[in-house]
Image (tube, rainbow, N blue to C red):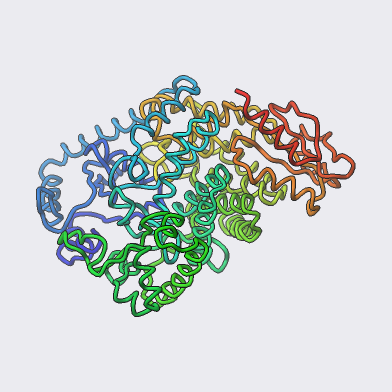
Amino acid sequence: MEHESFEDAEVARLMNETFINIKVDREERPDLDSVYMTICQMMTGSGGWPLTILMTPDKRPFFAGTYFPKESRFGRIGMLDLIPRVHELWRSKQQDVLQSAEKAVEALQRVEAQAPGEALDLSIIAQAYKELSESFDEENGGFGGAPKFPTPHKLTFLLRYYARTGDERGLQMTNKTLQAMRLGGIFDQIGFGFHRYSTDAHWLLPHFEKMLYDQALLAIAYTEAYQATLNHEYKQTAREVLDYVLRDLTSPEGGFYSAEDADSEGEEGRFYLWSEEEIRKLLHPDQADLISKVFGISPDGNFLDEATHQKSGSNILHLKADWADVASELDLPEDALRRELEHARQKLFESREMRIHPHKDDKILTDWNGLVIAALAKAASAFAEPRYAIAAERAMSLILKTLQTPDAKLLHRFRDGEAAIPGFLDDYAFLIWGLLELYEATFQVGQLETAIRLNEILLENFWDDDSGGFFVSSKQHEELLVRKKEIYDGAVPSGNSVAMLNLIRLGRITSNSEFEERAARIGRAFSLMISRYASAHTQLLTALDFALGPSLEVVIVGEPEARDTRAMLQAIHNQFIPNKIVLFVPSRQPNEMASIATFIKNFKSANEKATAYVCQNYACQMPTTDPAQMLAQIHSLKDRT
């Protein structure tokens, strides 16, 4: 729409004669996007981006839509016809327009005034599982048909459902989807990282944009799947995704950029596509033959051009089967196949680096950086990979240094040396998530102290005292038509869902029951909406799964760098035990941690060895210095229903 309409001289003239034109970056102003997207859905029955809103000077909308071409075609009105009609309507029937705008605002306010419902219980978790099972694509993995989005929080929910119930189908759906995405064209087989979504049901032809939040959430999903299954492919995929982020989306200061465009040289996907001829010029004939077989290369191309419905001549690299099956088909040892493909991949990557790269969106957003910090910290723990923790700490340091005001409130965006826009709910919720994961990777008490302080600011400035839940914007933000609350877990989980889990974890750490009561109120605030479509709220149900238990408190007392301490901690991190908190108490400085978690004040190491206390609702098993005994206690308690 930007290229077709906004940059067209004739359209621009009409727009400037008729409107005051305001272009909003929805990533910078999610509060505006939330309000006016709801308006669009109410007026038209659907939504999407680009979002087009026409409003009166006092910001009351009277017309909404999404994409408008320059000229009308196939029943869709174009800008050259739309603008004169709106101009005439405003001139001749302005009072009707104003009344229509007033009704739209009243309808919006009614939508936002939904009363709280009943407390959520295990039945809603079972309902979400049933909905996901019914919409699961048995052949290709994922949910529903094309276009197909990753939605990794659905998969992490299914892992928890499997852990709770032992239902193998939950694990099977997760495995099928994670494997299909990693094999497909939605994954960049040469440079790593995931594209935004697949335009087809087979994960082959992606929309080639790469979003930072997708990398973070998918890295978390693959890391947790590795913990649950010990499938090496999941570990490798998580590492490749994070290595892509550290290589291509990291600023010199250590923060993380927002995205890479789909287009380069005016063509979507050009940077990522290959002709067979290009591959044969770059590689030894034997390597080229191998790459062609493994990655589905065809002389005519391996996908259809959308305009002509003919083979495009270009290829999207994708694996037709998993590594073991490919090795068997080619009669090669799997490790030899991997070595050969890695050698060829490096050659292709080095050649591709010489191409004109897609544009990089170099905004550093607090909320999305919080997600990456959480992903890096979780991977650092699960894979015993210190460099991920170092990168997470560096990013956190940048955020707290440059995107905090003197009174400790967060700002939303940093770019070109400027930090701006007061922080939104997602900024606080996602950064607290990152801090909690980072604490469990590094056990620096300062991470917990910062999380608690930001949580206090969040409660003070965003909480809805009347109905419960958090508003998108704080008391200090400009006044919009309504103060929105969001709960839908879409491409990114909602701030309320993430904040609910944060509150439960912080409540267990600090023994503060008020935090857990606030978490319960979030569930009640949105329970009517959730009950209508439970599987659209899987991140919130992940929080509910923790709240309903069984959950654990695991405390390790020991010397931070001692071998037995590391062995004890790694034994926990290797396991998929999602509903737990892990605290570490340095045996020579116990008081610092005890000031936050008062229930641990009498915990001591036994015989100067690393000692584990495994507790449930603060009732603890006998302390042990044996990692195997600690794990036995953990599994005994978590299996209680």
- Give the farthest residue toward the top: 118
- 510 or 639: nearer the viewer: 639
Quarter residue 531 falls in: top left
Rendered position, 188 above or below 96: below
Can you give x and y, in whole percent of width and height, for residue 235 in the image? 54, 53
Query: Which quadrant is home to the N terminus?
Result: bottom left
* Residue shown at 57% from the left, 31% from the top: 546
* Residue shown at 50% from the left, 29% from the top: 522
Rendered position, 587 above or below 535: below
* Residue shown at 45% from the left, 26% from the top: 126
- Give the farthest residue toward the front: 331
Count how many numbered circles sit on residues in the image.
Answer: 0
Query: Which quadrant is home to the C terminus?
Result: top right
Rendered position, 126 above or below 380: above
Quarter residue 130 falls in: top left
Residue 485 visible, this angle: no
Q: Would you say 138 lies left or right of 587 here?
A: left
* Residue shown at 36% from the left, 71% from the top: 289
Residue 106 visible, this angle: yes
Quarter residue 400 falls in: bottom right
Can you give x and y, in whole percent of width and height, for residue 366 in the image? 52, 53
Can you give x and y, in whole percent of width and height, for residue 524 in the image? 48, 24
Can you give x and y, in whole percent of width and height, for residue 552 in the image? 66, 32
Q: Would you say 153 lies left or right of 318 here?
A: right
- 554 or 43: nearer the viewer: 554
